[in-house]
Image: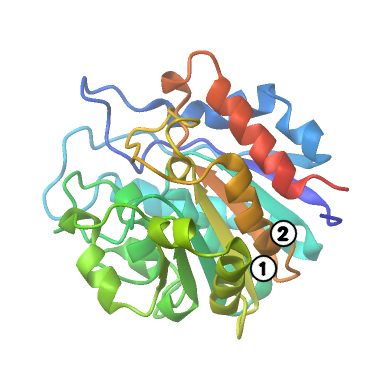
Amino acid sequence: MTRHIAVLGAPSSIGVGPYDDGEVRHLDRTPSVLRNRGIVGRLGAIDMGDVVPPPYRDYERPANRPRNEAQLVEYSRALGARVASAIRGGQFGVVLGGDCSVVLGCLLGARRAVRGPLGLAYVDAHADFATMEESRTGSVAGMGLALACGRGDSPLARLAGRTPLVSARHVALVGRRDAGRAWHGNAALARSPILDLSDNELMTRAVGDLSADALARVGQRVAGFWIHLDADVLNPAVMRAVDRPEPGGPTPDELVALLKPLVDHPAALGLSLAVYDPALDPDRSGARQLVSLIEELLARR
């Protein structure tokens, strides 16, 4: 990559449910842990600091709305303003989350920066296409893609006004391996125009063809596209520090080969990383894997 890179922290856990003992998950520590591993210097990037979220409120699942809904509306707008600032002028944004709900603020900011329709490459082991009624936890992290596409009765689905943050026609979901789980919104996903490049396709098709298919979906007839990377898409043999590991999945090298053509595309605006949990990574091996992966994708040659 020859563009300047701007790193931004989104230390948020407000989009995900607490641990079983009721403590808020430690995903908010991710930006500091990755900075301590030298990610900013290794990318030759500008560090634009953190956008700190409001306090966690909904320790118990509320009725008729997602957890921390009002706080997430506020946070998505604040994060969106900083993302827009980070990528104006052609810089490539790297947002270090946090839970998967950070994708909403990233998309909101990207729309403001380019003033046009967006594409989205959503790289995740789960569909994240549930509505509040389908979700088992009430956590926005499991509804992130649905809300981004305007699915669901929530102000989070209307952050961009009457139109969704991204049209499902311009979305590629990459690496999903949660088939048969109704609470992830898979039935609605199958009826949608989203390009679903499941883990089975990653295992059976040439990586170049997969990258080309994803680019054809997210990069055409748009003003730019965003890449959202959930750490749980990686094989749990190399990435254990996630709350919902799924068997299978690509290795870091395989994922880099798949995503490198997207990152290098001139219409790519930025990348958000989510769901890595430092509390589940005492030896920081997961952090080292993620920093190396991001460096492989983005470091200047």
Residue at the disc numbered 1? 113
Q: Identify the element where label 1 is drawn.
A: helix
155 to 278, vertically: above or below: below
Residue at the disc numbered 2? 87
Tell me, yes or no, if residue 174 can be seen here.
no
Which residue shows up at 47% across the image and 34% down it?
A: 276
Q: Is residue 287 left or right of residue 182?
A: right
Image location (x, y in percent) of residue 146: 33, 64
Which residue shows up at 60% across the image and 86% down it?
A: 221
Which residue shows up at 44% across the image and 81% down it?
A: 169
- Disc 2 to disc 1, C-alpha distance: 7 Å
Image location (x, y in percent) of residue 285: 56, 21
29 to 147, vertically: above or below: above
Question: Which three-letter amino acid code belongs to the residue tagged 1?
Answer: Ala
106 to 195, vertically: above or below: above
Which residue shows up at 66% across the image and 63% down it?
A: 262
Display colour scheme: rainbow
